[in-house]
Image (cartoon, grey):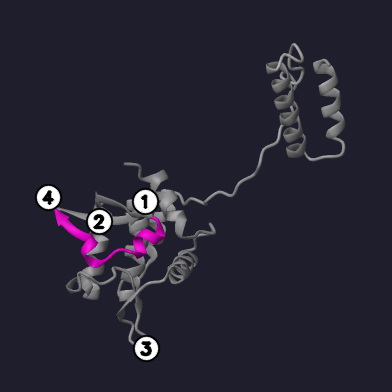
Amino acid sequence: MQPLHVAGWIELQTQTHSAPTVKQRLAAIRHLFDWLVTGQIVPHNPAASVRGHGHTAKKGKTLVLEATEARQLLDSIDVSTPLGLRARALIALMVFSFARIGAALAMRVDDVYVQHRWLWVRLRERGDKRHEMPCHHTLEAYLHAYLDGTGIGGDPKGPLFRTVRRGTGQLSETPLPQANAYAIVRRRAIAAGIGTKIGNHTFRATGITAYPR
């Protein structure tokens, strides 16, 4: 058995099977001959030098905003209402702290605190990992405006991001669900004229790309 024989067999396989299947079969042949060589049944592995056909799997990719688009979105939000203050603070938190949406929505009011004259945020990421970091100056301003403008600063153990009481326009004591956060993000992006189809994870990717620490 020579490499030419294995290569010819592989070529025949490509006519009736997909590239991933052919690569699996070639790998099986290699393992078989490795075992035969180890057992001194054959002197060499004829499949070792044979290459399968290339195959690249296409994977989804999180869409990323340009830094100018992120600024355009933040600047477009009307912050004369608690809803606007909440939306701007949430989006800015994801952009400037690289927080995942789940970690952002899990925050309590006292997870925003002052340390060494800087405003810091405390995030609880996956696997119960706690991450504390000083705020970007823009995020600091937006969080101060949000806490002061909505009056939730006096409820330190309450959720940082909350639903709105129906008919009042004021924040409730109920944590904001992730589906609601996604709706807010999409609605604000459309209103700002952002063409990119963004989601909650877009801002984390945007922050990592545009504002590396």
Q: Amino acid at mark 1?
A: Phe
Q: Is residue 56 above or below residue 71?
A: above
- The numbered dot on residue 121 is 2
Q: Label 3: which residue?
A: 167
Q: Is residue 105 found inside the magenta-colored segment of the image?
A: yes
- The numbered dot on residue 211 is none
SS at badge 2: strand
Q: Are marks 3 and 2 in contact (CB under 8 Å)?
A: no
Q: CA distance from mark 4 to mark 3?
A: 41 Å
Residue pictured at 21% horizontal, 54% vertical: 120
Q: Label 1: which residue?
A: 98
User: What are the residue bounds of the magenta stretch?
Assistant: 100-116
Q: Earlier in the sequence, mark 1 or mark 3?
A: 1
Q: CA distance from mark 1 to mark 3?
A: 33 Å
SS at badge 1: loop
- The numbered dot on residue 116 is 4
Q: Amino acid at mark 2?
A: Val
